[in-house]
Every structure is written in structure tokens, then in C-alpha cells.
Amino acid sequence: MEHEPDRSTLVTVAPGADPLAVAAHLGVRVTRAWSTGFATSSRLPVGVGEVDTPMHVSSGTQPHAPWNLDRVDQPRLPLDGTYRWTGSGAGVTAYVVDTGIRLTSRDLVGRVSTGVDVVDGGPATDCNGHGTHVSGTLAGTRFGVAKGVRVVAVRVLDCTGSGSTSRVLAGLDWVLHHHVRPAVLNLSLGGAPSAALDAEVRALVRDGVVVVAAAGNGDADGQAVDACTTSPARTRVAITVSATDRADAKPVWANTGRCVDLFAPGVSVTSDWDTADTATRTISGTSMASPAVAGAAALWLGAHPAATPAQVRAALVRAAGTGLVTGYGTAPDRLLRTGG
């Protein structure tokens, strides 16, 4: 008996053997070859090779999902209670430049590592909670948009959530010189306009890193300001993200302006916390919206690993829902959508 002639067969050769030489010895036509074997549509004796079977992008469904995940996979309200995804972002590395990460978090187990700690030279362990929360929204098995991403902790803020522009620059420069592509970097932080910080973000993007930044949470009185007046949100090559609530409304404190690229859920977002491996907390901010977009960028990079940051940004903008956000001010009316 022989294999059907119209079906492709995969043949694995012995270690060190030349696949093309083996094919020539068998007298078969090679349709594709690789270092350990080849594919052929020629007839082969039964027992030689294996049938070339279909492969598909991984997908999944998460019932009873947190509202912010539930929102990004569907075009309109009401929520259906489920988060659906295609692809997991596997193969993509996400650099979370923040307060560090709880490295033993159950939600990130096996996919989180220390990058650098420019605060005190430690293992980049979170003692604030913010960085762990952000990482969970980006990549957590339970709370994350991109559930297969590898996360690297870059600690630039201390236990109070504070730091300096120079510390942030040091963390970003570490990523610039050590990143593995495809890569996305989340900046759920901000401050006064800084030419130095903007320049470092531009350098990262030139080197192929997708940079996502929070738009910011307004002034001391809790009122939104123009995101173009803060760094790194004002950096045009970054993907700048403002926040919405369960009703797709922008809260009064979420910054707006032409430097905003997308809105994403950022009010009453539940994610991981630093106090225990299974700890959670529900908080609000554009800091919570930014990692959702970083996760969506990772999903797209997982499917298109050679994509440039500009291509990733354009893809997310194309996929975004319009005519949905209320109170968006002078920002574009674009709400994150992963496609589900």
C-alpha cells in the first residue's frame, strides 16, 4: 500500500543526514525542505513519513471574564460576559516599565522574569502593586489580554510609585540594548514634558519596539488635561491610550487631546496585586487602559512578528470601534477592539 498521491507527506531524516540527499535516494519530488526533513507529494511506502495535517492559530474563550476584557473583544455593548481571543501573543516579549512585578504571581507563572531594577539593583520585585496590576492586564492568564506573552520587569519606580525621569531613562535604555523582538513596551507612567524621555521612546521605536503609553489622569483637581502636555504621552511614535468606563464614557480625569491614539477600559479594572501570589485589586486610571492596548499589540505581533511599530499602530487603529466613546473631547473617537 502507498500514500495517496495528492496528499503531502512529511519525512524526518536521521540526525546529520541531508534531507535532499535522502529524497533523491527515494526518488521523490521535494515540495518543501527544512534542516531535519522534507515534504513531498510523491508516493511513498506505508510507514514512511507522516501526513501533513492542518494547523490553526490558537484561540480561546474565557467565560465570566472581567468587564474590561469582555469589552475589548466585541464591537458594541451590552457585554456578553465572555472574552474571546485568537492567538495568545506567544513569542512576543512585553517589557513593563513600572514599579516591578510580583515574580511569583500565579497569573503570570512561567512567563515573567527580571529585566533590570534601577531603583535599588534588586530583582525588580514589586512593593507597590501598580506594576503587577499592569502586567496582569497585559498578559495574565486570568486578567490578561495576551495570555501567552513573556513579561519582563523593568523597575524604575519605588514602593511609593514614584521615581525620576532619569530612572525611567535608565530603564528604557536597558530595554533599548537588551530587548528581544518582537517586543512591546508599556509605560503606565508620566510626568512633565521631557525632550530626553521623548527621544528615548523614539529610539526604541526606531529599533522595532512597540511603545504604548498612558495618556495620564488629569491635574491636581482631577480634571483632564491635554495629553500633549505630558511625557511620554505626547511622543507621536508611541501609542497613547486614554480610558473609558463600562458605559464607554471617558471619565472626567482621563486626559484627552490629539496625542491620544486609542481609548480602552480603565475604570474599576481588576487585576493582580503585589501582596500575594493570588492577590487582586480593583483600581482605575489610564495606567489600566494602556496595558490592554499593549496586550492587543502583542496579539497582533504574535501573528505578524516582522511587523514594524508603525504597522502595529495602524492595525490597532483600523480595528478600533468608532462612534462609541462619549466625552472624548479633542481625542479621536477610537475604542480598542481585539477582534475576539
Image (cartoon, helix red, strand yellow):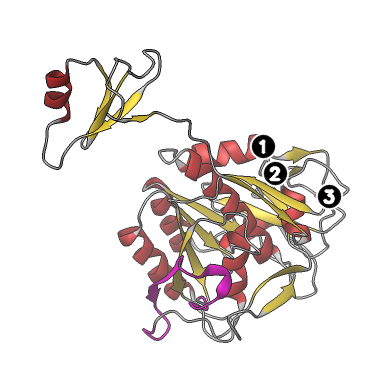
- Can you name the residue that lies furthest to the front here? 1
The answer to whether the residue labelled 1 contacts the one labelled 2, judged by CB atoms less than 8 Å apart, is: yes
- Amino acid beneath label 1: Ala
Task: Check disc 3 and report its element: helix, strand or loop.
Answer: loop
Residue neighbourhood size for the residue with mark 3, other residues' Cα within 10 Å, grouped as few (<14), some (14–19), many (≥20): some
Viewer-closest of 226 and 301: 301
Q: Examine the rendered structure and indicate whether residue 85 appears above or below residue 188.
A: above
Among numbered discs 1 and 3, the one appearing first in the sequence: 3
Query: Which numbered mark, 1 or 3, is in the foreground of this view?
Result: 3
> Residue 182 location in percent, x, y?
41, 48
Residue matched to label 3: 80
Asked if residue 74 lies left or right of residue 138, the reply is right
The answer to whether the residue labelled 1 contacts the one labelled 3, judged by CB atoms less than 8 Å apart, is: no
- Amino acid beneath label 3: Asp
Badge number at residue 337: 2
Q: Which residues are magenta?
A: 101-122
Q: How many marks?
A: 3
Viewer-closest of 296 and 196: 296
Magenta span includes 105: yes
- Amino acid beneath label 2: Arg
Q: Label 1 vs label 3: CA separation? A: 19 Å
Badge number at residue 319: 1
Please give the name of the residue rendered at 43% of the width and 82% of the height, measured from the top-left corner. 119
Magenta span includes 2: no
The answer to whether the residue labelled 2 contacts the one labelled 3, judged by CB atoms less than 8 Å apart, is: no
Please give the name of the residue rendered at 22% of the width and 16% of the height, measured from the top-left corner. 28
Among numbered discs 1 and 2, the one appearing first in the sequence: 1
